Amino acid sequence: MLDFKFFDPSNPITKEERKEIIDFLHTHLDQFRDTSEAIGKAVSYALAESGRPGGFVLQGKQGDETVGVVVINKTGMEGYIPENILVYIAVDQKFRGKGYGRELMNKAIDLAEGDVKLHVEHDNPARFLYQKLGFTNKYMEMRLAKKKK
């Protein structure tokens, strides 16, 4: 069973904790990782910095060791788009296959106010866990990446 640390706009995070979480996600997202800068933006958003809607960061620990981290951002929408998006979840490689990902997901879902959506790549084995937890694939996502001027 994990111990949880919960960070949101009313439960601030220290600089050291922020760095630990960003570094953890950057390391343990493996081939699905984003840059540390992008991860930092999602964490800042979750903490409602710079006027963002907020969300939360959930850190699962055993003793002093981080087992996994989840970042949820509020979308600011309701009814037509879920209220929350699970931006990141990662579990340390040495703890995978022991049910910690499911435990983190269940806790994050319980803490999220409203519906939750997520994006997952077709070849990500975590998608099977998401399906077991009740996530469905109702829509196909399409993106247009506009060239920066």
Image (cartoon, grey):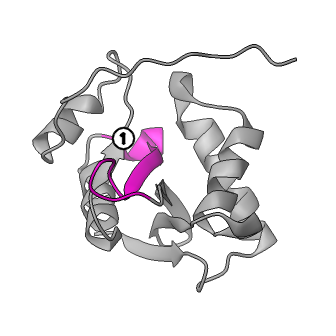
- Work out whether residue 86 or residue 75 is closer to the camera in this orientation and state it: 75
- Residue behind mark 1: 118
Judge from the rendering whether residue 34 lies leftward or rightward of residue 117; answer left or right.
right
- Measured from the top left, where is residue 118 in percent x and y? 36, 41
Q: Neighbour class for label 1 at 10 Å: few (<14), some, many (≥20)?
A: some
- Work out whether residue 9 or residue 23 is closer to the camera in this orientation and state it: 9
- Measured from the top left, where is residue 137 in percent x and y? 20, 29
Determine the residue positioned at 71% across, 63% down.
18
* Residue 141 drawn in magenta: no
Q: Amino acid at mark 1?
A: Leu
- Measured from the top left, where is residue 138 in percent x and y? 18, 30
Q: Quadrant of residue 93?
A: top left
Span colored in magenta: 77-96
Determine the residue positioned at 71% across, 33% down.
35
- Work out whether residue 59 or residue 141 is closer to the camera in this orientation and state it: 141
Judge from the rendering whether residue 81 lies leftward or rightward of residue 53; answer left or right.
left
Q: Is residue 23 visible?
A: no
Q: Quadrant of the C terminus?
A: top right
- Measured from the top left, where is residue 108 in percent x and y? 34, 63
Q: Quadrant of the N terminus?
A: bottom left
Residue at the front extreme? 80
